Image (cartoon, coloured by chain):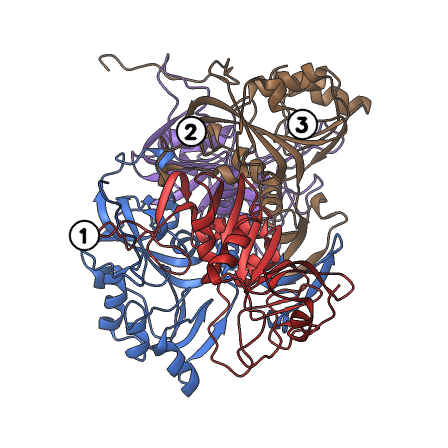
Chain colours: A brown, B purple, C blue, D red
């Protein structure tokens, strides 16, 4: 009889992905290519699983990140908010190889948060009067219309964090945080790719972004490509 | 002498109250930031950032600090980062004072269509529906009509809606127009040299 | 036409409480006496308002904190989760001077979070099969029963934070955090009593516990009583 | 030779798996912490703390670091603090493996009554209902009967319920008993020197 909160650090990506099987629902953090768990994404392809339901805001872009899963044909369904210029997804959606469920971004986030927080369903104003209404209960509360949306859980969450202690307490960096903390709460098994791995006590209790209570496995991956999606800049004025 | 894109951005920026929280949509609305005095307003980016600054100087781009259009940006002193659930809680909860968004169609009652073209490629919804239905005020910045002269300011949207009755003001190259409860566009101002008849022809609902 | 996010720092408690009127609903942070906004609590009494609806986990204790509001007879209704040894509340509840609405603590917290997040109502398993069910919609979702609970907003939130910048970005200290951040999101006007006031830029963006987006006024109060409610300790072993 | 309070706490502590997240209720359950090897489990306190440590050394008490019973505590390395919404999201979301709670009545089907006495002073609900319905496993630690011999392990609770069918094990001074789906208490073990007949008389539902 042992709980899941001892010895969380795994010595390989393969060990960290133990139990991830074909047909599962997998959430993967990142906003486009920003904040991707690069090693875990590669590890899932190496594992040889298929027929995954992928929950991700964008499912990759420019052939990178989760677009590698699309190219490897291991995804049967994508739940996302935005396809944009992700041609790998557009082509497979057009051919019918992948089913795509498009959800408003805030509803996607809140459905994950609800799954993690034991809330099976909630009302939201987003989508009222649009195609998003289809098949959903609509109700007027205090004079405004709302849709009932259901919690979205997953079998696995694969996320990345900047600083991680051996209990799995997480700190994220800038906008690489995005969906990762809430995905961690929504999954039965949460695996974290750690840029930096530190001992317990190295992160002050008040500085923890997400408690290790939500984290089950940690793998240390110090090197990342971190590709730019749109590298925009301005000229430095003279003398600055 | 219709408004240029820069004029439109400047005109939209003039709608931003001092000390407000603003979300600027992808494309033309993003340009509004160039016309805001320093510290005038606080820019929210729905991927998890408040206090967004300008593009970084060349060589200082950080792939992990981006806006909702996935462009590299900066964060100003007093800025804060947060997760996506918190970011959309801010939007849906009415804590973002103003959204300035691009639009494909706006109806005379304020319906907004800006996420999909009928029969076109599905680009996705992104944050559009949350922003349109959650922000306290929504301003649309758009071309007044298509190149072929098809109306984009219409009586009823024919494109898939983003949200119903949310747009309070439309800024186009021809002027500034407010949707109304009775289904007319109220003319707030016309761009220099633009006459009302021209606008009326290019608008799919009555002007008042 | 001016927004509410400029010049948030007020030079007195009275100025920070401007607009707080009799009959309003006021949320006050703290878990018992831990994390109380002591100066703001005093300030409301000094202001002379009455008939307040107070939302607080405990409404004070031992005659301190919010118990001073009860003694000053300025509260007509309390929404809380626990009365415990708060005799000032027990006596006024018994006499009918104050109406008390008791809510499960997690539901109280989630109702505030919902109000701040634009969620008008949500389903929760807490309270099913208990008196909490009374007057609420019950629904079976995926085989389990849930109650529908509504968002709980307020006119004012009065909270305290350890470190606050001039934009109102907040950092809390240890368990003094409790309800304060979510109350800040649920109120039309949020007033923060700052232990330490710093310039913008002094708190790294990744270290902000609650964004200044939710904060409208800040008053600097460096001195606090911080009374103990139950001071428990153990003897230090010899030589440690 | 029924169990002492310390025996009961030790017996309850033996139910805590290594590497689990545990919430200990106010009163007797709190004593379980004294019988856990260092680092064995991680204590959650619903006022916003995971990794709660023992009481502070004399003179080191911090009024802003307390447990849900408002007693001064400490935080261990690897601990974390969070707000009340997050804390109850952990509980309601099933992320707390075990709650060990005090009880006034437990029914043979596992109903728990531990927050109010009929006709008594209303102490409030606190975190009791969330813990009882949200934690993955619930163990009740309680006196087997009242001083007057009234049953507390009952066929049907007469006190206001905290949650229905949630208690999987009851630890009393007389032994360890599991509620069952068919409304009997299954005898898991008896305290040294306690015989089954004595227990049967003091229990308001059949034993199996």
**Quarter of the picture holding the N terminus of chain A:** top right
Label 1 with label 3: CB-CB less than 8 Å: no
x 49%, y 42%: residue: D41
Marks 1 and 2, Cα distance to the nearest angstrom? 31 Å
Residue C39's place in the image compared with B17, above or below, is: below
Q: Judge depth for marks 2 and 3 and give the one in front.
A: 2
Query: How many numbered marks are there?
Result: 3
Residue farthest along the front direction in this orientation: D193
| Spatial CA span between label 2 and label 3 | 44 Å
Task: For marks 1 and 3, give the one nearer the viewer.
Answer: 1
Q: Which residue is mark 2?
A: A174
Residue named by callout 3: B148
Depth check, mark 1 against mark 2: the one in front is 1
| Mark number displayed over residue D92 | none
Residue at mark 1 shares a chain with residue at mark 2: no
- Residue situated in front as seen by the camera: D9 or C28: D9
A197, C25: nearer the viewer: A197
Q: Looking at the rendering, in which quadrant would you find the C terminus of chain A?
A: top left
Q: Position of residue B39 (x, y in %)?
A: 30, 37
Quarter assignment of residue A206? top left
Chain holding disc 2: A
Q: Which mark is residue C222?
A: 1
């Amino acid at each position: 009889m042992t709980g899941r909160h001892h010895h969380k650090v795994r010595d390989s990506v393969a060990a960290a992905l133990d139990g991830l099987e074909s047909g599962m629902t997998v959430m993967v953090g990142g906003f486009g290519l920003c904040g991707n768990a690069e090693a875990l994404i590669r590890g899932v392809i190496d594992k040889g699983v298929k027929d995954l339901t992928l929950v991700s805001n964008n499912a990759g872009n420019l052939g990178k990140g989760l677009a590698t899963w699309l190219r490897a044909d291991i995804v049967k369904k994508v739940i996302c908010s935005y396809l944009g210029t992700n041609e790998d997804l557009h082509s497979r959606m057009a051919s019918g190889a992948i089913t795509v469920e498009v959800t408003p971004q805030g509803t996607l986030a809140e459905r994950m948060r609800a799954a993690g927080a034991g809330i099976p369903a909630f009302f939201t104003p987003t989508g009222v009067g649009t195609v998003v209404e289809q098949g959903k209960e609509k109700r007027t509360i205090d004079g405004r219309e709302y849709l009932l949306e259901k919690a979205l859980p997953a079998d696995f969450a694969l996320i990345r964090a900047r600083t991680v202690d051996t209990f799995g307490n997480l700190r994220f960096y800038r906008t690489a945080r995005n969906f990762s903390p809430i995905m961690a709460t929504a999954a039965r098994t949460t695996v974290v790719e750690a840029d930096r791995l530190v001992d317990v006590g190295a992160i002050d209790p008040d500085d923890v972004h997400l408690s290790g209570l939500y984290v089950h496995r940690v793998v240390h991956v110090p090197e990342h490509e971190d590709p730019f999606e749109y590298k925009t800049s301005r000229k430095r004025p003279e003398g600055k | 002498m219709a408004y240029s894109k820069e004029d439109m951005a400047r005109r939209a920026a003039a709608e931003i109250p001092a000390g407000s929280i603003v979300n600027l949509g992808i494309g033309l609305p993003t340009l509004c930031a160039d016309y805001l005095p320093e510290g005038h307003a606080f820019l929210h980016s729905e991927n998890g950032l408040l206090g967004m600054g300008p593009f970084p100087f060349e060589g200082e781009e950080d792939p992990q600090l981006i806006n909702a259009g996935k462009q590299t940006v900066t964060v100003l002193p007093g800025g804060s980062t947060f997760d996506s659930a918190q970011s959309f809680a801010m939007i849906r909860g009415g804590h973002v004072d103003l959204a300035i968004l691009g639009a494909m169609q706006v109806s005379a009652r304020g319906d907004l269509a800006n996420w999909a073209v009928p029969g076109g490629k599905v680009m996705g919804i992104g944050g559009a529906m949350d922003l349109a239905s959650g922000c306290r005020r929504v301003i649309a910045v758009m071309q007044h009509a298509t190149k072929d002269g098809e109306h984009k300011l219409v009586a009823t949207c024919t494109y898939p809606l983003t949200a119903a009755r949310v747009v309070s003001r439309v800024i186009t190259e021809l002027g500034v127009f407010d949707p109304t409860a009775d289904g007319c566009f109220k003319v707030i101002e016309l761009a220099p040299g633009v006459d009302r008849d021209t606008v009326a022809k290019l608008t799919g609902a009555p002007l008042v």
